[in-house]
Image: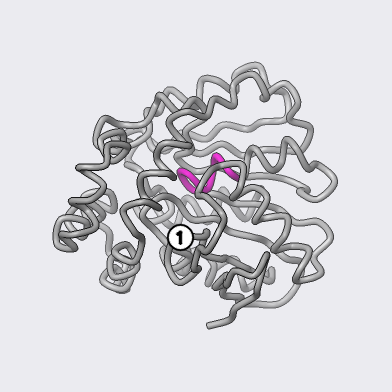
Amino acid sequence: MSIVVIDNQVVHYEVFGRGRPVLFLHGWLGSWRYWFPTMEVVAENFRTYSFDFWGFGDSRRKVTQESIQNYSDQVIRFLDELGIDRVPLVGHSMGGMVALKTAINYPDRISRVATVGAPIDGDSLSWLLKLTDRPIFADAFARLPWLRRQLFRFFLGETADPAVNEVIDDSIKSSALSLRRAVSSMWRTDLRPELPRLRVPALIVHGGRDDIVHPNQADLFDHVGAAEVVMMPRSRHFPFLDEAELFNEVLLRF
């Protein structure tokens, strides 16, 4: 476990491999941990990094409110602290939204971007996630760890990842306020007007059976010249776990 202090707040991160850096960003209710199987593969050729967003996993939030913009700022501050000039970003779900926004706004720092199951228009989120924008449901998730475990297991589906229990354990570390603010920011973020400003190569991956973020988000890139869209029909919300071998092949080629 490694930590770096950004704006007087602890950020937990992990790093594996050698070579050019690649940064992985996790989604809502998660942590760096569910990227571990992918990072192991990519680390054979690259130096892979992943950190916990403020309010998730083992990154503690003191003053920074959870939002897509603040998490994008956290990416740049993380790169600054580690002395990384320019990096490819890989983000899942909420992390994919953060990755895309960061690539659009900081093309001098982000060399290319891959999003996986990312909401581009926040309204594409399932009703289940939108419920946690309401304090009563967010508080229920915070008070009832078994409920959050069941929810995240539903998100993960029938994965063969042996570390799934560690992934689920990390999912119960966030407060009700962190969960609610993060969902609220996602729901109210719409990156569609910003897509014409995307200047770096982009890989857009969606699971055809995704019931958390609507797969029609892939259609928004039909006229974005810098983007390559890959639909994985057998996958749900976690293509890198559902069809790991195919996903790794696509990602490494990119």
Residue 171 appears in which quarter of the rendering?
bottom left
Q: Majority secondary structure of the magenta segment?
A: helix
Tell me residue 57's x, y (percent). Answer: 42, 67
Quick one: 221 or 194, which is closer to the camera? 194
Quick one: 250 or 15, which is closer to the camera? 15
Quick one: 188 or 47, which is closer to the camera? 188
Describe residue 250's horizontal placement relative to residue 20 as left or right: left
Tell me residue 103's x, y (percent). Answer: 71, 41
Residue 40 vertical position relative to residue 186 in the rendered view, above or below? below
The residue drawn where x is 36% and y is 54% is: 29
Residue segment shown in magenta:
92-98
Describe residue 104's horizontal placement relative to residue 62 as left or right: right
In the image, farthest residue toward the bottom: 1
The residue drawn where x is 76% and y is 69% is: 81
Quick one: 215 or 65, which is closer to the camera? 65
Q: Amino acid at mark 1?
A: Gly
Tell me residue 150's x, y (percent). Answer: 17, 56
Tell me residue 114's x, y (percent). Answer: 61, 45
The residue drawn where x is 59% and y is 26% is: 191
In the image, farthest residue toward the front: 63
Describe residue 244's horizontal placement relative to residue 173 as left or right: right
List the residue tagged with mark 1.
55
Magenta stretch holds residue 43: no
Q: How busy is the neighbourhood of tag 1: few (under 14 within 10 Å), some, or many (20 plus)? A: many
Total numbered circles: 1
Residue 206 vertical position relative to residue 164 in the rendered view, above or below? above
Tell me how the rendering is colored: one colour
Describe residue 205's horizontal placement relative to residue 82 as left or right: left
Secondary structure, mark 1, is loop
Residue 4 vertical position relative to residue 187 in the rendered view, above or below? below
The residue drawn where x is 24% and y is 57% is: 142
